[in-house]
Image (cartoon, helix red, strand yellow):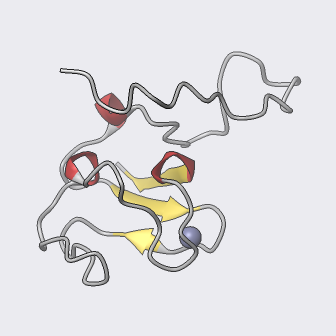
């Protein structure tokens, strides 16, 4: 099952000092790092997505893990991409 096959966009690699791993705790679209209770934070506006709360703005039900958010979901405050969220609490 392929999702998001239209976006093979790689974020700008301006962290040459740290080639093999991204910013510590960054999610980078890898849902396999996420548990159902993982809280993630928008690195642009610091909005936190808490699965226990869901997201009223996007009508995401409470209890929805970050990995189960709809593909079009983005930060409700700054509309930042899901991929730029960072893991706060695994
Ligand atoms: Zn944001």
Does 14 sit left or right of 26 as displayed?
Answer: right
Of all residues shown, which one is farthest toward the top?
20
Residue 24 location, quadrant: top right
Does 58 sit left or right of 15 as displayed?
Answer: left
Residue 86 location (% of width, % of height):
52, 52
Residue 47 location (% of width, % of height):
50, 75
Is 52 drawn above or below residue 33 in the view shown?
Answer: below
Query: Ligand 1, what quadrant?
Result: bottom right
What residue is shown at x 67% (from left), y 39% (from top)? 23
Q: Nearer the viewer, residue 8 or 31?
A: 8
Of all residues shown, which one is farthest toward the front?
6
What residue is shown at x 15% (from left), y 61% (from top)? 64
What residue is shown at x 87% (from left), y 23% (from top)? 16
What residue is shown at x 42% (from left), y 58% (from top)? 40
Does 15 sit left or right of 71 as displayed?
Answer: right
Q: Nearer the viewer, residue 48 or 60?
A: 60
Residue 10 location (% of width, % of height):
65, 28
Is 46 drawn above or below residue 21 in the view shown?
Answer: below
Quadrant into which the N terminus falls: top left
Does 29 sit left or right of 69 as displayed?
Answer: right
Question: What is the count of numbered marks?
Answer: 0
Residue 34 location, quadrant: top left
Residue 52 location (% of width, % of height):
18, 71
């Amino acid at each position: 099952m392929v999702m998001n096959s239209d976006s093979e966009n790689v974020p700008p690699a301006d962290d040459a000092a740290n080639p093999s791993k991204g910013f510590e705790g960054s999610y980078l679209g890898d849902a396999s790092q996420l548990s159902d209770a993982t809280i993630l934070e928008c690195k642009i506006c610091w909005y936190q997505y808490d699965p226990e709360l869901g997201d009223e703005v996007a009508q995401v039900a409470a209890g929805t893990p970050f990995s189960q958010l709809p593909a079009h979901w983005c930060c409700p405050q700054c509309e930042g991409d899901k991929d730029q969220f960072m893991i706060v609490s695994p």
